[in-house]
Structure formats: structure tokens, C-alpha cells
Image (cartoon, coloured by chain):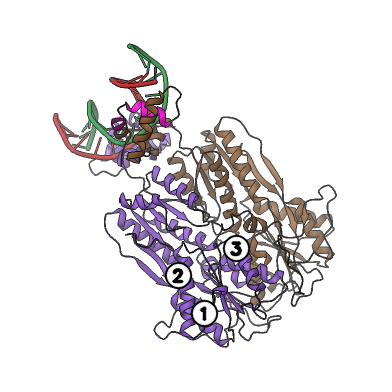
Chain colours: A purple, B brown, C red, D green
DNA sequence: CTGAAAGCGCTTACAG
DNA sequence: CTGAAAGCGCTTACAG
């Protein structure tokens, strides 16, 4: 593989000059520039990024440690992050923690060893001394989605409280009186916050959330199944289940149907995090949708600010409720009625006859499906 | 951040000695070793991977360029790749091509600039001069899933022909007579092979696949929707649609239901690539499942061989048909019957009363659901 | 077993 | 505008 010396020889200049044209340094004669450029061409020279990074102490690389690649929410987040990073001239290296603290630390360590310029993390726990050390060492870090309380790091996340309040109103309106929740690990902020939001919204409506109706999951499908089964074994099972992420909702759905029960007739189901497949599950699942794209973009911008030495503010974006049929809504449970296709829309579900109560202060937090699916169906480049 | 010099000073030895203990070189006195190790500890020293790579000309990093991160198939593949790579002491950097040749080349270029030790690619087209150059330059490369014909590179992929033959038998047995296919781009091997397999299997049964029943998609949801709509607009629409990947199946399902039609009563639907959500779509979708985990592992092992200078063989693993209800199978279309839960299984669907014809030479190619979902439900670490 | 020194491929003051 | 030279943080023959 040709090096900068070969290019210099071919062009009849010094390596310094080659380096200058490669880096768009102003003081290079037009003649030298052309010769270097053509030498680069004929040798198909490509600068060695490793050497460059060692010299400049910058890698133009961002690390992103996500909790679980198999979770479509994080996959969408990763895509948005890479897109925005590319715009800003950065590459991103993704580390998948698989919800395991050791694996998270493995990736953080590897990323740090590689001297990435900045780190985006969705921490799987509150502990990691490694992350705390990195923060102390002034490594540019931004938390996305989840964060570690008490640590001085900008956080980019969604606030689901209004949407959860809408969900609770929706459930109560449909007659559900014994709502339960499959929570994420208490060690994660999203694990505890979602339970808190649910409990508070219920208590505002005078409904209690007994301990037996709070099941502890780990954000993975299998735990959703396990907790749902425990709920169904209760002397008085809940009549509605809210899963704190989409994978646990999948597991819960599995468990419910495994008992021969049906959603929403026997038990209602809702999930935090909306994904395209929820439109097509049986029944379509009501979910709290995060503005994933925007979160990813905002996180990268904040991190770029931190890298530039500035102190970006945390950003909190609202989530919104997407109503479908999994909590019951007066829809016929059998076949859909024929109707005209909705050409530019991805919302095959008719509007719910009884929209949930809206928080008047946030009229846009609730919507009827579709927007959540749009990313996968619309923002992709269509076939030429 | 402490460097090797600081460690040397702290331990009272030369940097050479520090380097030796860090790299487990045998000729280091026990005394020197302990002192270096404790210096490393007190300074929380971490070797700079960038400098190390420059010197050793190895990055212990693999590049993986996948066609689309939003496609659960590739996400599962990426996870398997990272897992196996980690076992072998490699990190992996994922590049998402989003089915776009320019983006694929962007990532390949970036990865090459970073001097990754080897590259795993699932090419989005047959062209990329960049990839061909890399092959010519003897960069260790292995193709996964898709490949570029005529290029001397090991290929790790699944052969879906037997499974597609099973699918065709299944469709015909259920009375479908006008099967159509939503193909992937002809520029990809998986795009053309799946059509060929489908056409051949049909012709073996004396059924033609007219041009009007071959729709060209791009492996993304939106194209599945578009092609399905075109099918439904035909004077004589197909009575079964086989989507060449899971995202196009999602789009097709959208389009079909947007017309108020239902699956499988009005039209059957099947997909290539099985994903956990297919168990819970309405109806559950019959799919050709690839051994994704094994493909990822095998690809990494082959690449490691190539990096070591050996010439690994290509590997082809069989795919298998997973029968669910989307092609019709005599299941009631309404509610499920109550029944006991299947504790350790993720297959809520009862066995199909009419299993498809099996190729006697490959009795294990067909199965009844479940196994495909197992990865996400079982192989994850459960909550402690 | 140990250290001084060269060198990996770049970038960038510095001097001209 | 240009080049010689130092140096980024490591590893590794080489000599002792």
C-alpha cells in the first residue's frame, strides 16, 4: 500500500507538501497541488488514518454504546446517530452492551483505548466506575436515552410522562381497573422512571399500583414472558399490562397467547417504545413513541459541542402516545372492513372512536398511529 | 492521560520493559513485572491502541459492512459477528450501507483507511470498484449473505433453495395457483437467487411465474408496499405473494390491509428471513429462516483464517421453512383456542395440520415455527 | 533479563 | 510557497 513518501517521490515534492495538499492547507502552489493530486490518483493513495490520529490526537470517531442491538429502538437510534455524525465528519463505532454491565465496560474500555473523540452512552446500570472515571478524566461524554443521576454529563432523552398519563387515561376510559407494569431494571433510569410515571398517572386518577402488579424485567423478551406469566398466575390477575419496552411486550404477548388468552378482550397490552412491527401484530399494539431520530441527532450535536470544549445543555424531548387496538377501543376484533387504500400514509388502522384525554398543555403529544412507522417506510431512499 | 513513559518512570524501568510486561513477553524478571503492574495500576494506564496499531500494523479490528441496520436479519447477523470476533480477540466496526452503493463505499473506504485487519461485506451491488481493488490488493475479505460473482473471495451464506421448494409445495397444497414474488434488486445475489429458486421450484411443479408476477423491490418496506399495490391492481392479481426479505413483507402486509383485504383468506403471504415479530403479526407469517447465528460465526472464523494467511473454503448452510398461518393452513382465522402454556417453547402456534412436502434428502429443512424465535427469547442472559 | 534506539506514517512549527 | 526535522506512543530487533 502506497505511503505518503511514495506520493512525494511520484510528485517530486516533499512529504510536507503532500500533507499540505491533503489537508487543504492554503500555502501550496497550484502547480504542486496538481502534481500531488495526480500522484495520489495514480498510486490510489489513501492516508493512513491510524498514523494521522496518532499525530493529531484526534480520531474523528465517536463511540456509541447501546444497551441492546436486537432492540429496534436502539437500532433506529444508532442509525440516526451515524447519520448525523457522518454529516459532521465523524465515524461512529457501535458497542452492544446486551444489557450486561461487563459487556458495556468492555466496549467503553475498547473505545477509550482507541482514543475516540467522544462517547455516547445509554448506560445499563448506575455503577460503572469506568464511566465515572472517564467523566472525571474529562472525556467528552453525552448520555442518550438513559443516564446516571448525579453525574455531570449532558443527557439527551425523551420525557414519557405526558404520554404515560395519556395512556392511563386511555386505559381507564376503556374500563380497565387493574393495570400492571413490567418494569425495566431499577438500575437504569428508564427502568425506574417509567414505573414512576405510570404510578403517578394512576394515582392522579385515584387508582393504586399494588406491588404484585409491578413485575421486574430486564428489558429483554424472555423477562417479559416470565413476568406476564407471574401476573396471570395471580389470584386476581391484572386486566392491563404496560411493558416498559418493546421486547418485553413481545415476550408478554407470547405468554398471554400461550395461555390461550386474547388481547385486548382478556387483557390489555401497551408498550413503551414504538416500532414498525407494532402496526402489524395481532392486535396492533398501543405504544409510547419516542422521537428517536431527533434524539440521535441531538445527542451527536451535543457531543460535538462537548468535543469542541463547550458545555451543551441537556435536552428532553416529549414522547407521545400512539393508540392502536391492544387496549381495546371498540374495534371489531375480527376482520377489518374493506376501505380505500391510504396512498401516502402508513396507517391502515381507522382512527380510534374514543381518543384518549389530551393534556391541554401538550396537544400534540398524542397521535393516531402512523408517524411512528413513518421512519422505516418513508425516510428511506426509494428505489430509483 | 498517562503514557508508557510515565509508567516506566513510576516503575523505575525502561519503556521497553513496560511494553514487554504489557505484551506478556517471557523475558521479564518477576520483580520488574510486579513493579510495572503496580505502576500501571496506580496510574490507571491504558495502552494507546492507535500507537500500538501504527507500530504493529495490526488493529485487531474487523470491519462489517451490512446492507441495512434497520433490518432485523442484519442486526442479528451483526450481533453474532461481534460475539465471535470478541472471542477471537477482535473488535468489530459496523458500517450501515442502507442498501446504497455510495454509502457502502463510504464505509468500506473509511474502514480501509483505519487499517482494519479484515473486512466482512454483504455487498449491495455487483460493482464497487473499491471492493474489487481491495480484493486485488489482497485485503482479507469475506462475503456474508450476499456476494459478488466472479470475485475470488470466500462466501459464507445460506442456501434457500430447498426451503423455497418446501414453500412452493406448501402454497400449492393449500390451493394457491397464482404465486407472485417481490424480488430484491437484481444487482444483489440474494435479489436474483431468490427469484430463481422460486421460479425453478414452481416450474418443477408445472406452475409458471409470469413477468407480471415478478415485482422489483429494493429490500426496503416501502418497495414491498409499492409492488404489492401493483400486484393488486392487476386484472388478475396473484393469490400468493412471496417477499424476498422481511421488510418488503412488512410493506406488502401494509398494502394488502390498506385495501381491506386479508391474509391469508384473500391472498397468501410468505417472506424470506424469519424474525421474532413474525410470530405475532396478524397473521403469523410463514418464512424461510436462515441460520443467522451460524452464518455470523462462520464468517468471522473464515475471515480470521484469511487474516492468518490461509485460504478458507466458502461455506453454505441450509435455510429452512417455518410454517405459520399466512399462507392459510386450515387454522380458524378468529380467536385462538385456549390451551396449556408451552413453558420452555416460544411457539404458541399449534402445529400445522398439513405439513408441507419434505425433500426426503433434507428432512430437517422444514420445521414448525419456534426455533427461529428462539435466539431472541432464549440465548439472552436472563435477569439474575 | 534489560535498555537505547530505530521506526511505524503521518503533521506541523520552524527556517528559509 | 517549500523542505528538513521533530515527534505522536508505542514495539522490537540488537547489543549487552
Residue A167 is labelled as: 1
Disc 1 secondary structure class: helix
**What is the crowding at mark 2: few (fewer than 14 residues within 10 Å), some, or many (at least 20)?**
some
Where on the picture, by quarter, is residue B170? bottom right
Q: Secondary structure at mark 3?
A: helix
Q: Position of residue B139 (x, y in %)?
A: 52, 35
Q: Is the C-beta separation of discs 2 and 1 under 8 Å?
A: no
Depth check: give the residue in front, B213 or B27.
B27
Disc on the earlier residue, 3 or 2 = 2
Mark carried by residue A193: 2
Note whether B131 is above or below A120 in the view shown: above
When the figure is inspected, residue A345 is found, relative to residue B26, above or below; the finding is: below
Other-residue count near label 1 (Cα within 10 Å), few / some / many at <14 / 14–19 / ≥20 = many
Task: Look at mark 3 in the image and give the residue it sits on.
Answer: A223
Residue A136 vs B172, above or below: the answer is: above
Residue in front for this viewpoint, B280 or B111? B280
Q: Quadrant of the N terminus of chain A?
A: top left
Marks 3 and 1 sit apart, C-alpha to C-alpha, by: 22 Å
Q: Is residue B69 left or right of residue A111?
A: right
Which disc number belongs to residue A106? none
Of labels 2 and 1, the one closer to you: 2
Which corner quadrant holds the C terminus of chain A?
Answer: bottom right
Chain ID at mark 1: A
Q: Are marks 3 and 1 in contact (CB under 8 Å)?
A: no
Indicate the chain on which mark 2 is placed.
A
Q: Earlier in the sequence, mark 2 or mark 1?
A: 1
- Pick the residue in front: B346 or A115: B346
- Magenta-drawn segment: B8-22
Distance from disc 3 to disc 2, alpha carbons, whole Å, reads 18 Å
Q: Earlier in the sequence, mark 3 or mark 1?
A: 1
Q: Main secondary structure of the magenta part?
A: helix
Whole-percent x and y of residue A363? 43, 83
Amino acid at each position: 500500500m502506497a505511503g505518503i513518501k511514495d506520493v512525494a517521490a511520484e510528485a517530486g515534492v516533499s512529504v510536507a507538501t503532500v500533507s499540505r495538499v491533503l489537508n487543504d492547507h492554503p500555502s501550496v502552489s497550484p502547480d504542486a497541488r496538481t502534481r500531488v493530486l495526480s500522484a495520489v490518483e495514480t498510486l490510489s493513495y489513501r492516508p493512513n488514518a491510524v498514523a494521522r490520529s496518532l499525530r493529531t490526537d484526534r480520531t474523528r470517531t465517536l463511540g456509541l454504546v447501546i444497551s441492546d442491538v436486537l432492540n429496534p429502538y436502539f437500532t433506529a437510534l444508532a442509525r440516526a446517530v451515524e447519520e448525523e455524525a457522518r454529516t459532521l465528519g465523524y465515524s461512529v463505532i457501535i458497542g452492544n452492551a446486551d444489557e450486561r454491565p461487563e459487556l458495556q465496560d468492555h466496549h467503553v474500555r475498547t473505545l477509550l483505548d482507541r482514543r475516540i473523540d467522544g462517547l455516547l452512552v445509554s448506560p445499563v446500570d448506575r455503577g460503572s466506575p469506568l464511566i465515572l472515571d472517564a467523566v472525571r478524566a474529562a472525556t467528552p461524554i453525552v448520555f442518550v436515552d438513559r443516564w446516571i443521576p448525579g453525574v455531570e454529563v449532558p443527557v439527551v432523552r425523551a420525557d414519557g410522562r405526558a404520554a404515560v398519563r395519556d395512556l392511563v387515561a386511555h386505559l381507564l376510559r376503556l374500563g380497565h381497573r387493574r393495570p400492571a407494569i413490567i418494569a425495566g431494571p431499577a438500575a437504569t433510569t428508564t427502568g425506574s422512571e417509567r414505573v414512576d410515571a405510570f404510578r403517578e398517572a394512576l394515582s392522579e386518577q385515584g387508582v393504586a399500583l399494588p406491588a404484585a402488579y409491578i413485575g421486574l424485567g430486564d428489558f429483554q423478551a424472555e423477562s417479559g414472558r416470565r413476568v406476564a406469566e407471574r401476573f396471570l398466575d395471580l389470584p386476581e390477575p391484572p386486566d392491563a399490562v404496560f411493558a416498559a419496552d418493546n421486547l418485553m411486550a413481545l415476550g408478554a404477548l407470547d405468554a398471554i397467547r400461550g395461555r390461550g388468552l386474547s388481547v385486548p378482550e382478556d387483557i390489555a397490552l401497551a408498550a413503551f417504545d414504538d416500532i414498525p412491527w407494532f402496526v402489524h401484530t395481532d392486535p396492533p399494539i398501543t405504544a409510547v413513541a419516542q422521537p428517536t431520530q431527533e434524539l440521535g441527532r441531538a445527542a451527536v450535536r451535543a457531543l460535538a459541542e462537548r468535543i469542541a470544549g463547550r458545555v451543551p445543555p441537556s435536552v428532553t424531548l416529549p414522547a407521545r402516545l400512539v393508540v392502536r387496538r391492544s387496549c381495546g377501543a371498540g374495534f371489531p376484533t375480527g376482520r377489518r372492513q374493506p376501505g380505500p387504500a391510504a396512498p401516502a400514509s402508513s396507517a391502515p388502522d381507522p382512527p380510534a372512536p374514543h381518543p384518549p384525554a389530551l393534556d391541554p398543555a401538550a396537544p400534540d403529544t398524542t397521535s393516531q398511529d402512523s408517524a411512528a412507522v413513518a421512519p422505516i417506510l418513508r425516510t428511506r431512499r426509494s428505489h430509483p
